[in-house]
């Protein structure tokens, strides 16, 4: 027993990664670079659209019903008149942001960054009466923490089955809220330590209501960790490294580790940017969708001319897309077969194509058996790159025998393959409809003196009504 105890004490000695990270969060100068703020503002606008669209999703409404039982507060809930406490509002708004899987991805985190950060910061900022610029500053700082922790544990962490949105997201939200509250280095360190005690969530929940709730839980826990730290609650000073720390428990020795410099230049928002989705489904399907749409545009074929479609992805993407014949809207968002069928038939994917009404469309279901998805063999995987972690190869086999192939490394919406302004505006309209007053506030977000008016605007109004798209090229499909 004594030997075991000495071994544990030896293993506890590790670099002070968390205190160094906390010191940077507390002391870094206010973020003012125009390019950085522009990227952050774009991410905020994107997630606001996702929150509006997801506000009336069944998962969001059920989470909100539960949250209302815990008492009222002063913080706004998107699309609802009731106000809640900051943690409860962050939970509901985070669930809304992620409900339709239309929110952005962040490469080093291997998860959804803004759906966690924005609802947490919005709640804390509304409670504090903070400015739009303070929100953007906290967002960039929280994103940096998500990146550095993600770089230390991924992809081992993600491939073990952890949902990084919920695990790593909690740390980022805690750091962002601590920054907004103006905590000193010790306070930020305490917030990160308490976030460690709240991090959790398995990818086994993909395709269920719990999956979007993971973003809400991470946002809620980030608010709580910062508030608890501000009240003087403390935890262990080094929760990330060492025996029983986050890296050992959630990733293990084969993970990359944090190194001696937890923060470095350029900032993660500059190096990686955010992947702003233009398809409302799991990111693991996006490269394959993009490749098929590029083939369709280049060669001008219709669905009636195609015999079958074959998709080759890495094992990680294959495992995420676990529903070849989806029965619910949630399952459809995690179905390569459904996404490819819709893309082939319509040339685009919209929110209405993942509705209960759309699931009954016989012309889409007729295509599901004609789509195959395989994963690469060990040692022959598609390469992994920054913002290109889920590449795909797609083959369209035409009825007259011709085989068309295309490979996509980076999904549309990344720094390497940016979405156009028109595509992003079309997404905003699909999610939020025509909201000129809200759009105007988002355009001057960094100049808002107090976030409370903005949050009140978000609480008003429901998302637009949608119907599944009508396919102009259905001939030949029975």
Image (cartoon, rainbow, N blue to C red):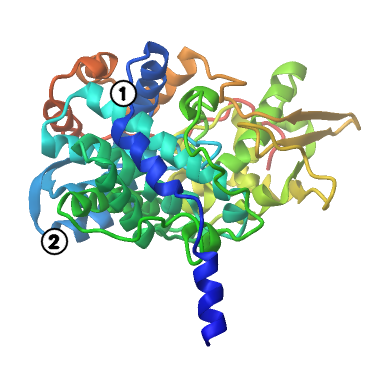
* Category of crowding for the residue at label 1, using alpha-carbon neighbours closer than 10 angstroms: few (below 14), some (14–19), many (at least 20): few
Q: In percent of the image, x 91 and y 32: which residue is there?
A: 401
What residue is pinned by disc 1?
29
Would you say 43 lies left or right of 64 here?
A: right
Q: Check whether the beta carbons of the residues at disc 1 and disc 2 lie within 8 A of each other.
A: no
Residue 90 position, x and y percent, is: 25, 46
State which tag comes first along the sequence, 1 or 2.
Answer: 1
- Where, quadrant-wise, is the C terminus in this rendering? top right
Determine if residue 54 is in view: no
Q: CA distance from mark 1 to mark 2?
A: 37 Å
Picture residue at 51% right of the left edge, 37% below the top: 261
Figure check: 411 above or below 211: above
Q: Quadrant of residue 466?
A: top left
The residue wearing badge 2 is 70
Give x and y (percent) for residue 154. Answer: 59, 48
Give the structural element (helix, strand or loop) at label 2: loop
Q: Position of residue 67 (x, y in %)?
A: 19, 57
Left or right of 135, for residue 402: right
Crowd around label 2: few <14 · some 14–19 · many ≥20 (10 Å): few
Q: Residue furthest right?
A: 401
Q: Residue at x 49, y 40 (%)?
A: 148
Q: Is residue 449 visible?
A: yes
Where 98 falls versus 395 (above or below)? below
Left or right: 351 as drawn, with respect to 65: right
The circle drawn on residue 165 is none
At a point 71% along the width and 31% down the height, the residue shown is: 303
x then y, percent, for residue 283: 56, 40
**Is disc 1 placed on a helix, strand or loop?**
loop
Instruction: Classify residue 442 by image quadrant.
Output: top left
Q: How many marks?
A: 2
Q: Nearer the viewer, residue 390 or 255?
A: 255
Is residue 298 shown left or right of residue 192?
Answer: right
């Amino acid at each position: 027993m004594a030997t075991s105890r000495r071994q544990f004490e030896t293993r506890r000695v590790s670099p002070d990664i968390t205190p160094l990270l906390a010191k940077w969060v507390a002391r870094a100068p206010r973020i003012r670079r125009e390019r950085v703020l522009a990227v952050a503002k774009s991410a905020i606008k994107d997630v606001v659209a996702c929150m509006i669209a997801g506000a009336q999703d069944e998962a969001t409404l059920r989470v909100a019903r539960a949250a209302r039982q815990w008492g009222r507060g002063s913080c706004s809930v998107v699309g609802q008149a009731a106000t809640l406490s900051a943690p409860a509002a962050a939970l509901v708004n985070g669930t809304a942001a992620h409900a339709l899987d239309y929110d952005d991805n962040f490469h080093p985190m291997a998860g959804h960054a803004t759906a966690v950060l924005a609802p947490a910061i919005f709640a804390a900022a509304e409670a504090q009466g903070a400015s739009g610029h303070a929100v953007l500053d906290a967002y960039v700082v929280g994103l940096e923490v998500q990146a550095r922790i993600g770089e230390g544990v991924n992809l081992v962490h993600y491939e073990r089955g952890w949902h990084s949105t919920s695990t790593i997201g909690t740390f980022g939200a805690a750091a962002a809220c601590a920054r907004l509250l103006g905590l000193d280095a010790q306070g930020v360190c305490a917030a990160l330590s308490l976030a460690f005690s709240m991090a959790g969530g398995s990818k086994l929940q993909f395709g269920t209501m719990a999956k979007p709730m993971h973003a809400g839980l991470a946002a809620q826990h980030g608010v709580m960790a910062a508030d608890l730290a501000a009240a003087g609650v403390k935890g262990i000073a080094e929760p990330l490294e060492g025996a029983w720390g986050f890296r050992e428990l959630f990733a293990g020795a084969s993970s990359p580790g944090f190194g001696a410099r937890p923060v470095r230049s350029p900032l993660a928002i500059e190096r990686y940017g955010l992947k702003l989705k233009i398809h409302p489904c799991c990111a693991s399907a996006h490269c394959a969708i993009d490749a098929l749409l590029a083939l369709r545009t280049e060669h001008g074929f219709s669905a009636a001319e195609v015999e079958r479609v074959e998709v080759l992805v890495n094992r990680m993407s294959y495992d995420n897309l676990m529903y070849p014949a989806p029965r619910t809207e949630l399952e459809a968002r995690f179905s390569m077969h459904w996404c490819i069928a819709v893309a082939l038939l319509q040339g685009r994917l919209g929110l209405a194509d993942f509705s209960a009404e759309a699931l009954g469309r016989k012309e889409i279901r007729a295509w599901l058996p004609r789509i195959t998805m395989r994963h690469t063999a060990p040692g022959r995987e598609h390469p992994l790159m920054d913002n290109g972690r889920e590449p795909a190869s797609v083959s369209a086999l035409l009825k007259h025998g011709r085989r068309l192939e295309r490979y996509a490394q980076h999904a549309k919406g990344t720094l390497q393959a940016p979405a156009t302004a028109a595509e992003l505006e079309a997404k905003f309209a699909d999610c939020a409809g025509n909201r000129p007053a809200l759009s105007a506030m988002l355009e001057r977000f960094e100049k808002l003196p107090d976030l409370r008016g903005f949050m009140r605007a978000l609480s008003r109004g429901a998302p637009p009504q949608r119907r599944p798209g009508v396919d102009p090229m259905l001939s030949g499909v029975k």
